[in-house]
Amino acid sequence: NAGVTQTPKFQVLKTGQSMTLQCAQDMNHEYMSWYRQDPGMGLRLIHYSVGAGITDQGEVPNGYNVSRSTTEDFPLRLLSAAPSQTSVYFCASCDTGDTEAFFGQGTRLTVV
Amino acid sequence: GEDVEQSLFLSVREGDSSVINCTYTDSSSTYLYWYKQEPGAGLQLLTYIFSNMDMKQDQRLTVLLNKKDKHLSLRIADTQTGDSAIYFCALSGGYNKLIFGAGTRLAVHP
C-alpha cells in the first residue's frame, strides 16, 4: 500500500519556468490538499479538493493552479515560478469525515 | 481566521517528560491533532483528540484539551532521543483543511 506518493522529491527551477508537482493516492480518498512548509511558519494550505472535478483555494493560492480529473491524482502547477515559491510542498489525502490525513514525503522546490 | 500558536523550541533530558503546548483562537474544530515530523520526512499523525474530550492517553502520549482556555498540550513520558523532531499542533477546518501551528522543535539530550 503506497499511500500518498509525491514526485519529484527535489526540483530546482529558474525564475519564470513552469512545472507540475505530482501527487497520487491509492486509498480512494475523496479529500486531497496541497500545503507548503516554510521555516518558522508551519504548513499553509494552498489548494484543496473534495472530490473529482471539485477544487477550491486555501490560504495561499496565488501562483498555483490545481485540477482533479480523477480521485487518485491531484497535481499542483506552478505557471511561472518565483523565488518566493521556494519551499517544501506536501500533498495530503483524507477520507470523508475529518479523520486522519495522510501526507506524502514532500517535494523540496528551489527557485533561483 | 484561525490562529494557532506554539513555542518554537523545547529541550529536555532523556528520560524526563516533555510537554508541548498549543493555543488557538477558533473553537469550532471537531478534531485537534498532533503531528510529528522527523528531518527530511513527511508528517506522521501521532494522536488526535475529539473536541468534546478533555484528555486522551495513548501509551507514552497524553493529550490535554482545555476548551475554556483554548489550550492543547501533548505530554511525552520518558522522552527518548528518538522523540527528537518537530511537533505540530493542527486543527481541522473541514474537508481535510488543516490549520497548523509553526511547530515546536523538541531536542532530547543525554
Image: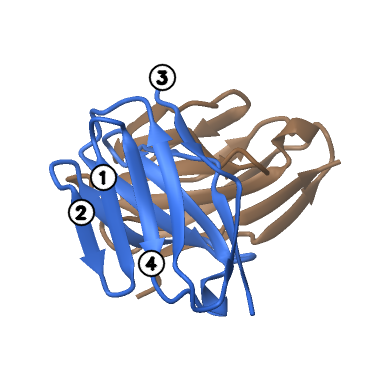
Q: Amino acid at mark 1?
A: Leu
**Which numbered disc flags the more N-terminal residue, 2 or 3?**
3
Query: Residue tagged by mark 4?
Result: A3
Q: Amino acid at mark 2?
A: Met
Using the image, tell me which numbered label, if any, was put on residue B26: none
Q: Is residue A50 visible?
A: yes
The subunit carrying tag 4 is: A
**Crowd rating for badge 3 (residues with CA inside 10 Å; few <14, some 14–19, many 20+):** few
Whole-percent x, y for residue B44 in the image: 43, 63
Query: Residue tagged by mark 3?
Result: B1
Q: Is residue A30 visible?
A: no
Query: Residue tagged by mark 1?
Result: B65
Q: Colour of chain A?
A: brown
Residue reaching furthest to the left: B52
Question: Which element is circle 1 on?
Answer: strand
The front one of B1 and A31 is: B1
**Crowd rating for badge 2 (residues with CA inside 10 Å; few <14, some 14–19, many 20+):** some
